[in-house]
Amino acid sequence: MADNTRKIDFSLEEMELVSPTPSLNLPELIEKECYKPKDGSPYLVFYCEDAPLKARTCPCCKSNSVDVHGHAANRTIHDVNVGITQVDILLAPTRYICNECGVTFARDLYSILPNRQMTRRLNEQIKRDSFVRPFVEVGAAYGYSDTTIATIFDEYVSELKSRRGPIVAPRVLGIDEKHIVNAMRAIFVDNETGQLLEMKANNKRDDIIQTIESMVDYDKNIQIVTMDMSNGYRDYVQECLPRAKIIVDKYHVYQDLYVKISRTKSKIMDVIGARIGSETDMAKKQYLSNVRDLILKNTYLFKFGQKKLAEKQSRIAAMANICETFPEFNHLRLLKESFELIYSCTDRASAEAACNQWMEYVPPTGAKKIEAWEKNYGVSAELFSEFRTFQNTILRWHTEIFNYFDAGCSETNATSEGLNHFIEQINRVGNGYSFSRLRAKALYWHLAAPRVTYSMTTKKMAVRVLGLYTGNGHMPSNIEKYETVYGIFESDEEQPKRPPVSMLSYYQKYHNESDE
């Protein structure tokens, strides 16, 4: 792989010696000198040699008759960041010669990745950081291109895939979709644990059914499926899960209701404007204008549920004044509040009865019925025509909407919606992830190891005896000599595991409270 690495931008004349020389805490390396920039820039460079091997074996003929044969030219190896300080190693690898076959060689060092000019621990630090921070940001922190960071990320994703195992079907499956990275993507969620189970490249029938049927014990475990009002998803779920109850997320029902309220409100405002314009009584005209201004000032009134409305007396007074002055707004209030009563019910029968009562406020079709309805409510049926289409939606999805009120079925799609937003935020922060990388970040972040940080500090640790190294990456087990060492050490403070963005809990809270 072509390694797009950071470069040393300081000459030796611009550096000064660090004394005493800190330890890298890499047992294969012997630190000769350490330098830092005179201008205080956050950078350290170590001049090192590898510790001589005690047991030497020729990699070609396996002879043990091997001698030191000088040192190779310096290699630049990039090491972990210490806070914001970048660390480089200039290593002059020891070369060996076999006295039997004449081959010269340098040994592989465990702490340095082959074919990549970085330490193993830096690679570990980058791959963990790449899951919780954008590639560009990680690249800037470590001095690499985002392409190199993405390659390390892909390698880590391959590791995590092997650990994931099969998906066990949940009791409550949430299905949602999002237009992201230029296409509609279906997501599958365990609503009870909040875990993202899968994210598909599209939302087509075969992929939806295949994903559900690939889950372990899908036909036994899945009892409830939550979704928005998508005819396609309903058909697919009924095909592969005929015994599962489909529940339409009440948030989407409310969302459709509020769209109708907003459109109706605009119609009413036009009628009120014309009424004020034609009013000849100046005192009355001024009064009507003042109440209209009250509506414009309090645009949120018809978005609040009764609980929110009752929080302030001023809101109640404003609503009362508006509804008393303009009967159209009073009827709009009746349509809104009577529908909200449906979701305050605790069983299916009372919810369906409340729905039947709400439908009385929806204008009918047919000239005679409309005439009777307008006489009864004192408002124009045409102003409230938006609610006819909303009523038809309720009738088409009656079973799935009212399944919510069956015992043990009061489930919503809030978790799916929250994860949908979570995925959107990862994509926005990442600024152009491919679908496969976006999916990996969303799907595997909880499997990724916590971030690792390093600091320059002192610790008591075992030290080398006679500078000998056994060649296996570890100190000999019989060493009992300890010294206090100043150098680079992994932080003892446990790093919490965190998602790539911190929007999920906020969005779930917002969603759950949106219909209050």
Image (spheres, rainbow, N blue to C red):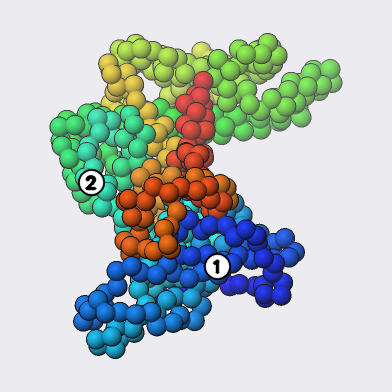
Across and down, in percent, residue 245 comes to 24, 28
* Residue 28 found in image quarter: bottom left
- Residue 121 visible? The answer is no
Residue highlighted by disc 1: 32
Could you tell me which residue is drawn at 29 percent across and 34 percent down?
A: 173
Residue nearer the viewer, 166 or 186: 166
* Residue 273 found in image quarter: top right
Could you tell me which residue is drawn at 60 percent across and 12 percent down?
A: 310
Residue highlighted by disc 2: 165
Q: What's under tag 1, amino acid-wise?
A: Lys
- Judged by depth in the image, the label closer to the viewer, 2 or 1, is 1
Q: What's under tag 2, amino acid-wise?
A: Gly
Could you tell me which residue is drawn at 48 percent across and 71 percent down?
A: 49
Which sits earlier in the primary sequence, circle 2 or circle 1? 1
Across and down, in percent, residue 336 comes to 51, 21
Q: Residues within 10 Å of mark 2 (few under 14, many from 20)?
A: few
